[in-house]
Amino acid sequence: MTGCGSRTNWDHFYPLSGEPDGLHFECWTMLAAWAEATSRVEIGALVSCNSYRNPELLADMARTVDHISSSGQSGTGRLILGIGSGWFERDYTEYGYAFGTAGGRLDDLAEALPRIESRWGKLNPPPTRKIPVLIGGGGEKKTLRLTAKYADIWHSFSDPETLQRKLGILAGHCADFDRDPAEIEVSVLATTDNRDKMYELGARLFTIHVGGPKPDLTALREFITWRDKLNA
């Protein structure tokens, strides 16, 4: 709840609401533009679809955007690598990717995550920092286990009651890897109705959805006021 916050887009090829063929742009080229146009906020996708890019390529893209975003005084990049297994079937069919099964896509994500980490260690120049990895999703057997092993941030799409239960499951997976659950920042899609409960449960990264092309920032401003009161 401190600092300048973050700004995220999503990794889809079509709108998820409204006009199905409405205005839309590609995720990672947009992130590169954001990296150049901003100087303080962290940026990333919520979330990048693992299916759409070779893991080594995605690692290199993330490293490059990390460097583009490091033009401030600290010289440290501001990219968060948000990643998930993918789910929007139209993206797959329209762009020629095999949709497969949910379990198969999660297995692919499990294979990709160590490859991404390995590639970061081989790149020259390397990333400017340990790029934080955000995993989005709530699958209890696979997604939360991958989160416990690899993630710095977990994004949940759950309501407060479900979030509380899943945090317990995540803690169990963390124990399997001898990891403190407190090392994983909790991110949520927040509303004015659930934010206080989410905060009580440990969420510290709150996402407020804003649509375009003429975004209404009223809710965002109200959330910033709420955040500043908490920080005070």
Image (cartoon, rainbow, N blue to C red):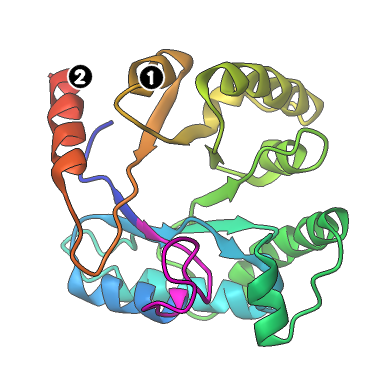
User: Which quadrant of the rendered structure holds the C terminus?
Assistant: top left
Q: What's the residue type where badge 1 is placed?
A: Tyr
Q: In the drawing, what numbered circle is on residue 199? A: 1
- CA–CA distance between discs 1 and 2? 10 Å
In the image, taking residue 203 as reference, residue 184 lies left or right, namely right
Task: Note whether 40 is above or below 173 in the view shown.
Answer: below
The residue lying toward the viewer, choosing from 191 and 111, is 191
| Quadrant position of residue 208 | top left
Task: Note whether 143 is above or below 80 in the view shown.
Answer: above
Extent of the magenta region: 8-27
List the residue tagged with mark 2: 230
| Quadrant position of residue 115 | bottom right
Residue 156, given in percent of the width and then of the height, sits at 55, 36
In the image, taking residue 105 as reference, residue 197 lies left or right, namely left
Within-10-Å neighbours for mark 1: few <14, some 14–19, many 20+: some
Q: Is residue 13 magenta?
A: yes
Q: Residue drawn 48% across and 72% down?
A: 63
The residue lying toward the viewer, choosing from 218 and 199, is 218
Residue 19, given in percent of the width and then of the height, sits at 43, 71
Q: Residue drawn 55% across and 52% down?
A: 133
Q: What's the residue type where badge 2 is placed?
A: Leu
Asked if marks 1 and 2 touch (Cβ < 8 Å), the reply is yes
Q: Which one is earlier in the sequence, the residue at label 1 or at label 2?
A: 1
